[in-house]
Image (tube, grey):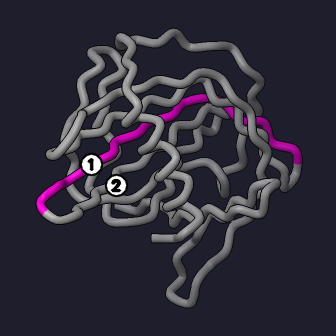
Amino acid sequence: MDIKNFSKVLGLVFTAACGGSTGAGEPELETPRSALPPELAGEWFTGTLSSIQYYDQTTGVWQDPSGEGFYFVLGADGSYETGAVIDSTVGNCRMRLLGKEIGTVTLDGADLTVYRHWVKTHVANSCGNDGERTQGQATRAVSWGIETDDSGLDWLVMTGDDGSVERYRRWTN
């Protein structure tokens, strides 16, 4: 796992482990959005995720997907969904983090502004407290590009203002 992504998710783990919960069915908020070109729009992931459908927004129920990793889905209409599934085992203790974030994006050339509506995290801890947490709106700016590796796979590369880099390969069926 990429160390930059790991530190990002570790922050989510600490936030979720601190407790707090909210009900399901968060309202959609109106934030700016732009249409996205086909080379950017689509499903992107890294890791070994079997599915990104592990949280039901209507019921608020979390599923137990197999694999772990990160995903980023960018809609052609400027909507997005991103999330993570992370497992950690220390001794006899197992911790699993599930996270989902939704929002909109605006595009200006190589600059992408991400408008988070909400992020929800769920932590299951076999040796401690389970927890859920929801955080609200936030905005961040990234630059983006598409790189093709030696095997012909396309990778979405997003670089934050702080120099952090997120890399996702295009999800293919």
What amino acid is at disc 1? Arg
Spot occupied by residue 60 in the image (x, y as percentages of width and height): 30, 19
Spot occupied by residue 83 in the image (x, y as percentages of width and height): 45, 44
What amino acid is at disc 2? Ile
Q: Nearer the viewer, residue 152 or 65?
A: 65
Q: Residue at x 47, y 52 (%)?
A: 10
In this picture, residue 102 sits left or right of residue 125: right
In this picture, residue 52 sits left or right of residue 112: left
Q: Residue furthest bottom?
A: 150
Spot occupied by residue 75 in the image (x, y as percentages of width and height): 58, 38
Q: Does the magenta run of residues contain 102?
A: yes
Q: Is residue 169 above or below residue 61?
A: below
- Disc number at residue 96? 1
Residue pointed to by mark 2: 86
Query: What stretch of residues is rendered in magenta?
Result: 92-108
Q: Residue at x 24, y 24 (%)?
A: 61
